[in-house]
Image (cartoon, rainbow, N blue to C red):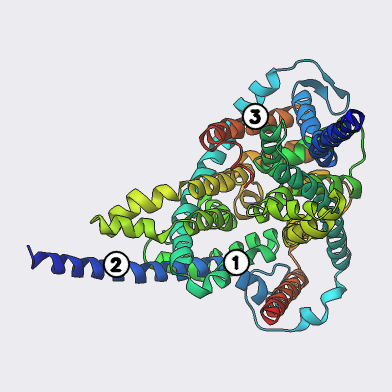
Amino acid sequence: MTTVAPAMRRRGRLAEGVRRHMITFYAVLALAYLMLPVAIVILFSFNDKNGKFNFVWSGFTLKYWKQAFEVPGLLEAFLRSLRIAVFSSFVATILGTLIALALIRYRYRGRAATNIFIFLPMATPEVVMGSSLLALFLTFKIQTGLTTIVIAHILFIISFVVVTVKARLAGFDRHLEEAAMDLYADEWTTFRKVTLPMIMPGVFAAFLLGFALSFDDFIITNFNSGQVVTFPLYIWGAARVGVPPQVNVFATGLFVIAVGLMGLSIWAQRRRS
Amino acid sequence: MTDGTATRSAAAASAERRRRRVPYLLLLPGGLWLAFFYILPMLQLAGTSLKSGSFAGGYRFSWEFSNYGAGFSDFSAQFLRSIAYAGLATLITFVIAYPLAYFIAFRGGRYKNLLLVLVIMPFLFPFLLRTLAWKIILADDGFVVDTLKAIGLVSHNGRLLATGTAVVAGIAYNFLPFMTLPLYVSLEKIEPAMVEAAHDLYANPRTAFRKVTFPLSMPGVVAGTLLTLIPAAGDYVNAQLLGTPQQSMIGNVIQSRFLLVLDYPVAAALSFTLMLAILAMIIPYIRFTGTEDLVA
């Protein structure tokens, strides 16, 4: 009895050790799998391609980085997507934050219905959302174009904003607001001086998420774009005849800027604390 | 004196009434947007699915339920393929994502945030470019196909590109972060003391995992599965870029009927059927978790 127990425990520890390393190995593999296509996208911005298609590695070149802006329509599509994303996410962030405030600060009749109503768009496949909007625009003879793209983007971002702002406020201390009211702050002042600063990081995160979702959306946009070409639509159109490596240059450039900003904000946070 | 109290309580009552109105005012702008551009389009989609006529002559509403029958009999293969591909891809993402999420939650230590950033990093690249990258990775004379040929997993003149395997792999890849993040969130919430308690009660690591860790991670499992399965079922980009018409899914049919064939009624019937199928899947989930967790 007494000899068995340590042996068993040792075997348990051994199994635990193997499991620990196996899971590390597995996690590294999974991350490599996640990174592989990203690495390919970056790598092929430097590919000295042969022929129309940029699918086979045939030597290193900086040519496409130097001629990044020389593909007709690409820069325009890229900038158009940036503008659409900033505007749509800005409007959706306001609408979504108001809904999140109602859900967090108030107990009202219809809360459960609000939750379902917010959840539904997220549970709707993009083809269904895109095609239903197109059905609406067709029925009311609304010409699809920039306006309909923005309408669609605001719609699908709202729910994600609500979720993000709400998650941030889950640990929200109502007593802080009550304390402000006790000190004779009116509701508006309380909101401005107490509530808003507390929810601001969540609101900002929601804006960034909305921006990313809008900038990269293809399926819903494809249904409602009319003649307007966004960055993903440009790639889709180019895929048939060969995507110019400049598209990879733009994607890599955007990635570098995003990572740079992320690094900067972490650095700033570290410095502050 | 009594007058003053009356006025005061009247003022308080009106303030209270105003307070009760506030949540509805907050909901109003976003609610209107959702009503006009989510609910109304869904009704229009249902309406369009019951129209008859032709694109040239115009479509008219006529309770044409046969659009559903026509859509289903013509495209049942694509419907079934969507379910099969989406289900398979969800299973694969789960098998890849669970250990990854587990690793980050329990062994990530001070690198936790860095690892999470790595998980969402692919999102910083356009979805279409990431999918096209799989075309390079799975190319006929590429490294992956050569290796699989060498170990006999792909036949001598076989290929991966333009097959169902490529489409499923592409879908599984694209939605991996959607699976990983909810799993991570629910695993991260588990108190280590709970697992230790299982060990103290002589559970071996496997039993402890099966009886404690896994059940506690169930909310993440359900959320991750839905977040992968729903978009996967409607996806048509992977089938289009990595497959051939032999791999086309219901999303491919809906988009080509709507945008190329201009057969709006059947396209709408297919789209509405997909929505109903998804709802049928979600309603048990809502029953299971309650509405509060939906949006959290």
Q: Are marks 2 and 1 on the same chain?
A: no
Expressed as whole percent of the image width and height from the top left, the position of residue A223 reads 79, 43
Mark 3, Cα crowd under 10 Å, few <14 / some 14-19 / many 20+, is some
Q: Secondary structure at mark 3?
A: helix
Amino acid under disc 2: Glu
How far apart, in angstroms, are the residues tagged by discs 1 and 3?
35 Å
Amino acid under disc 1: Ile
Q: Which residue is mark 3?
A: B273
Q: Residue at x 10, y 65 (%)?
A: A4
Amino acid under disc 3: Thr
Q: Which residue is mark 2?
A: A16
How far apart, in angstroms, are the residues tagged by discs 2 and 3?
48 Å
Mark linked to residue B26: none
Tell me if residue A29 can be seen.
yes
Tell me if residue A134 can be seen.
no
Along the line of sight, the residue nearer the viewer: B291 or B9: B9
Expressed as whole percent of the image width and height from the top left, the position of residue A222 reads 78, 48
> In this rendering, is residue B5 above or below B242?
above
Along the line of sight, the residue nearer the viewer: A165 or B17: B17
Q: Which residue is mark 1?
A: B136
Q: Secondary structure at mark 1?
A: helix
Q: Nearer the viewer, mark 1 or mark 3?
A: 3
Q: Residue at x 72, y 45 (%)?
A: A105
